[in-house]
Amino acid sequence: MKKLLILGILFLGYTASAQQISDNAIGLRIGGNDGFGTEISYQRALWDNNRLELDLGWKDSDEYDAYKITGLYQWVWNIDGGFNWYAGAGGGIGSWNSNRNLTNDGFYAFLAGDVGIEYNFDFPLQLSIDVRPEIGFDDGFNDDLGLDLAIGVRYQF
């Protein structure tokens, strides 16, 4: 009886997580704070409920110009129909230069997490909202915890 109960729980866990996510999705992730505002975002499915997300962000302001690339490994769970929620972890690298002090520039690295919800339409469109905490490793530009709230719009193929 105990083995049957364990097998039943494992089966329910497998069927709850077994879903199809799009093989590829590309679009924009529009946010703020330390996420630099707008990022070009690409998602690639690895398995039925796991994917890799790569984002290229940039910021051009009066104070500084900055670029960064972020890579996240994400787990995706179905809520109902086209609604999914996801969580992920990863990191990235970036570079920046000051527009006010020409000798003040450099590179930095950061660790990132990601938690969000998405809706996949019957046609190839995905809308999402997520929060991405990032902790940077640099002496001046990105050396603390930043939270980035963003909306994503991606074309699925």
Image: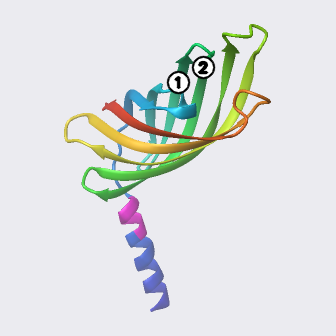
Q: Nearer the viewer, residue 144 or 156?
A: 144
Horizontal relation, residue 120 to residue 101: left or right: left
Label 1, on which residue? Answer: 56
Kindly indicate the quadrant of the structure image that contains residue 125. Answer: top left
Q: Residue at x 76, y 28 (%)?
A: 140
| Residue lying farthest to the bottom in this orientation | 1
Label number found at residue 147? none
Circle 1 SS class: strand
Give me the C-alpha separation between circle 1 and circle 2.
7 Å
Name the quadrant of the N terminus: bottom left
Label 2, on which residue? Answer: 67
Does residue 14 show up magenta in the picture? yes
**Amino acid tagged 1:** Leu
| Residue lying farthest to the left in this orientation | 122
Q: Nearer the viewer, residue 58 or 17?
A: 58
Horizontal relation, residue 124 to residue 107: left or right: left
Locate residue 50, reporting x and y percent: 47, 47
Q: Nearer the viewer, mark 1 or mark 2?
A: 2
Neighbour tally class for label 2: few under 14, some 14-19, many 20 plus, Cα within 10 Å: some
Does residue 50 show up magenta in the picture? no
Locate residue 113, reporting x and y percent: 58, 46
Circle 2 SS class: strand
**Amino acid tagged 2:** Tyr
Q: Which residues are magenta?
A: 13-17
Neighbour tally class for label 1: few under 14, some 14-19, many 20 plus, Cα within 10 Å: many
Most prominent secondary structure in the magenta stretch? Answer: helix
Q: Residue at x 35, y 46 (%)?
A: 118
Locate residue 53, reporting x and y percent: 49, 36
Decide: marks 1, 2 in contact (CB < 8 A)?
A: yes
Kindly indicate the quadrant of the structure image that contains residue 44. Answer: top left
Mark 2 or mark 1, which is nearer the start of the sequence?
1
